[in-house]
Amino acid sequence: MKYLDKVKGFLDDTEAKKLSSLIGKTSSLGPALEIGTYCGKSAMIFSEVCHKNNSYIFTLDHHIGSEEHQVGEEYHDEELFDVRLNKFNSLPEFLKNIEKSPFSENIIPIIGDSVEVSKNWKIPLGLLFIDGGHSMKAAKNDFDYWSKHIVSGGILAIHDVFPNPKDGGRPPYEIFCIAKESNKFKEIELIKSLAVLEKV
Ligand code: SAH
Ligand code: MG
């Protein structure tokens, strides 16, 4: 889709298609929520199926970036450095991008910290997509504070899950293991770095 061509983001096409299909299938159970908006690429992709199903994608981010997005770190993008605030800030780029999205009315942005927002959350979710901070604390918080909001039969999807340590960092994989061991989730599949589990 042309309007997505220049949108910065990390989601691979196969993973995006899988998630869109899962969001479509679970939309009758409840809306989908994504932790980690960044510049809106994934939310914009998901909004198409939400538009078809008359449902919503909530997308949550404090927009100050994860550890790896900060100045001097591996994934820092200097175009996203806000000189007025003197810090990383993906919010203006996100707002500019969703302006071009044909399905922006199906995207509900939430600007805040994952834990703080979760404490006020009451809506049962059909799907939760964890794609936020990659520190153990951030990943564990996202799982602990948000996975309880998924309805039975709903989906927990976790991005950047690498069973082999050579392929990438551990925390997303660790919470994937914690989810399975909790017996509250059963593994459905692992596609590229996207883990898909169903809430029992
Ligand atoms: N889903 C996006 C990529 C997300 S990158 C895409 O596919 O395009 C991870 C994002 O998580 C960053 O934008 C970062 O700001 C956000 N993040 C990290 N820790 C967070 C926290 N505790 N609360 C809210 N957002 C957080
Ligand atoms: Mg990711």
Image: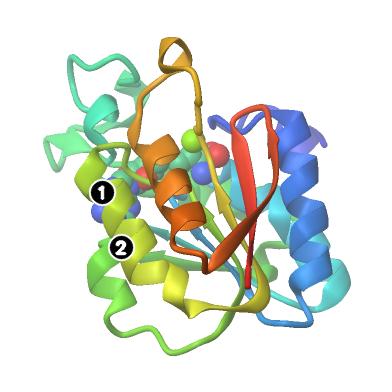
Asked whether residue 194 is in view, the answer is yes
Q: Residues within 10 Å of mark 2 (few under 14, many from 20)?
A: many
Give left or right: position of 70 versus 21: left
| Residue furthest top as drawn | 166
Secondary-structure class at tag 2? helix
Instruction: Depth check: give the residue in front, 16 or 187.
Output: 187
Q: For disc 1, does the CB lie below 8 Å from ligand 1?
A: yes
Q: How crowded is mark 1: few (under 14 residues within 10 Å), some or many (20 or more)?
A: some
Q: Which colour scheme is used?
A: rainbow
How many angstroms separate mark 2 from mark 1 (CA)?
9 Å
Choose top left, top right, bottom left or bottom right for residue 145: bottom left
Q: Do the residues labelled 2 and 1 touch (CB within 8 Å)?
A: yes
Q: For disc 2, does the CB lie below 8 Å from ligand 1?
A: yes
Q: Position of residue 101 (x, y in %)?
A: 70, 52
Give left or right: position of 13 versus 36: right
- Name the residue tied to disc 1: 138
Inspect the image, locate mark 1, and give the three-letter code of the amino acid beneath it: Ala
Q: Position of residue 20 (x, y in %)?
A: 77, 53
Choose top left, top right, bottom left or bottom right for residue 10: top right
Q: Position of residue 44 (x, y in %)?
A: 66, 51
Image point 16% across, 40% down: which residue?
A: 84
| Residue furthest bottom as drawn | 122
Image point 40% across, 52% down: which residue?
A: 178
Residue 127, relative to residue 77: is it above or below? below
Secondary-structure class at tag 1? helix
- Name the residue tied to disc 2: 114
Inspect the image, locate mark 2, and give the three-letter code of the amino acid beneath it: Ser
Q: Quadrant of the C terminus?
A: bottom right
Residue 148, relative to residue 133: is it above or below? below
Image point 18% across, 21% down: which residue?
A: 71
